[in-house]
Image (spheres, rainbow, N blue to C red):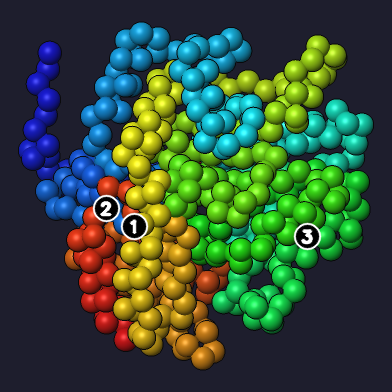
Amino acid sequence: MAEAKDLKTWNKEDLLEKDRTYMWHHISQYNPNPLIVTEGKGSWITDVEGNRYFDGMAGIWCTNIGYGRPELAEAAYEQLKTLAFFPLTQSHIPAIELSEKISDWLGDEYRIFFSNSGSEANEVAFKIARQYHHHRGQSNRYKIISRYRAYHGNSLGSLAATGQSIRKMDYEPLAPGFLHVQPPYCYRCSFGKTYGRCNLECAQVFAEAINWEGEETIAEVIMEPAITGGGVIVPPPEYLPKVREICDKHGVLLHIDEVICGFGRSGRKFGHQNFGIKPDIVTMAKGITSGYLPLSATAVRAQIAATFMGTAPNQHFRHVNTFGGNPVSCKLALKNMEIMEEEKLVERSEQLGLELRQKLSALEDHPRVGDIRSFGFIAGIELVEDRETKEPAAPDKVVKVINECKKRGLIIGKNGDTIPGFNNILTLSPPFSTTSEDIDFIVGVLKEALATIE
Ligand code: PMP
């Protein structure tokens, strides 16, 4: 067997040269000096030069359990040896066991359709929602209502559901039939109201959109429990129950996108469980395997799924995905969820989230910190030029803070270049292996980094 190459013998400049010649990076093609990461352990990653960084974004909001868990590698290895592949036109044991476990975590009867990515899981949901209405003789219900600032994926349907213009330009026309309403953004309320003295106009807009469009044309509403990538926008507690009520009243399905908020990230197993609602469709990815292997799922309430299970012509869901629900990914996901249960990582995420939020309050007096928001173990820090006018911080200042953090060994995210002038929200979503000392480190580094733009 060839000997494994000693990582320390790599030459960074050679690698970067090849990277610049052959690699096409996701989004950040303007970055000539990407981190070349070689190892991860817990919440920390190491680059090719041996520099260590705290991964404040858990990859892209996904390595919930933390890096380098040998149990996950072993589960995958055993499954690779036993059965590396079989399509889900038939069945295999890891998928059966995982679908039961997901249904159990959701706390109700759901049927699970597996794919590989969050975008695919959302596409599956859109198709199921539309076909479900066909089954009920309401074939005109094809429209899907989403929210501005939301991100739901990169494919032509999931991007159409996305409410961020900069991600969509140059690729339009996208899938037709998607519309958007204002998000529940209390810091910059679209309705000029203050929470506590409002009528939840941000939820009422769904009723208005449904009425104006004609309820007989609406298939579903899609939303994350809290908008994550779009700027950590956390709704008031009454918001989701109100949206659920409106959907019920108008025969519209409620699809909750748990691609980021699922698997403990919100301090509950799934983000919507913070609000006591039952969705009709739940999509999930990322944390399902803690990012170790590709996998996603679309969970559909049993009564809705039942309408697809007969033999009548065109009754079944005519959708196949070669790699979706690969046995190795399913086995690893099961192990990931078992470890979360055994080590009480969902509860740990909740505690870590509270601790992070409490310690971040040390930054509240900074003249450029407009708002600090959190949802479970996710935090967002909205930077402004002026706390009175709330003018968003200039992009160069936001980038400077991120770079200053990186220099000090902390990786954080930002609300990506979504709306001109509104990429001003720093984001944090660390792995659940994070410790109190790590949180002190995050806050200490952020304080120093913010001092450079005072
Ligand atoms: N939904 C949400 C809420 C997401 O954050 C993402 C990805 N960041 C997606 C869907 C799409 O997931 P993927 O990149 O796996 O296609």
Q: Which residue is mark 3?
A: 206
Determine whether label 2 and label 1 are within 8 Å by CB. Answer: yes
Residue 149, given in percent of the width and then of the height, sits at 60, 62
Q: Residues within 10 Å of mark 3 (few under 14, many from 20)?
A: many
Q: Is residue 446 above or below residue 378?
A: below
Front: mark 2 or 3: 2
> What residue appears at the point 36 percent right and 27 percent down from the top-left corner?
335
Front: mark 1 or 3: 1
- In the rendered view of the protein, which quadrant contains the C terminus? bottom left
Label whose residue precedes the other's in the sequence (1 or 3):
3
> What residue appears at the point 35 percent right and 84 percent down from the top-left corner?
366
Residue 12, given in percent of the width and then of the height, sits at 16, 47
- In the rendered view of the protein, which quadrant contains the N terminus? top left
Q: Is residue 28 above or below residue 190?
A: above
Residue 180, given in percent of the width and then of the height, sits at 72, 58
Determine whether label 1 and label 3 are within 8 Å by CB. Answer: no
Kind of residue at disc 1: Leu
Q: Which residue is mark 1?
A: 352
Q: Residues within 10 Å of mark 2 (few under 14, many from 20)?
A: many
49 left or right of 235 in image: left
Kind of residue at disc 2: Thr
Kind of residue at disc 3: Phe
> What residue appears at the point 56 percent right and 49 percent down from the top-left corner?
273
Q: Quadrant of residue 37?
A: top left
Q: Is residue 401 above or below residue 417?
A: below
Tag of residue 227: none
Residue 166 visible in the shown view: no
Give the CA distance from mark 2 to mark 1. 8 Å
272 left or right of 278 in image: left
Tag of residue 434: 2
Give the CA distance from mark 1 to mark 3. 34 Å
Q: Secondary structure at mark 2?
A: loop
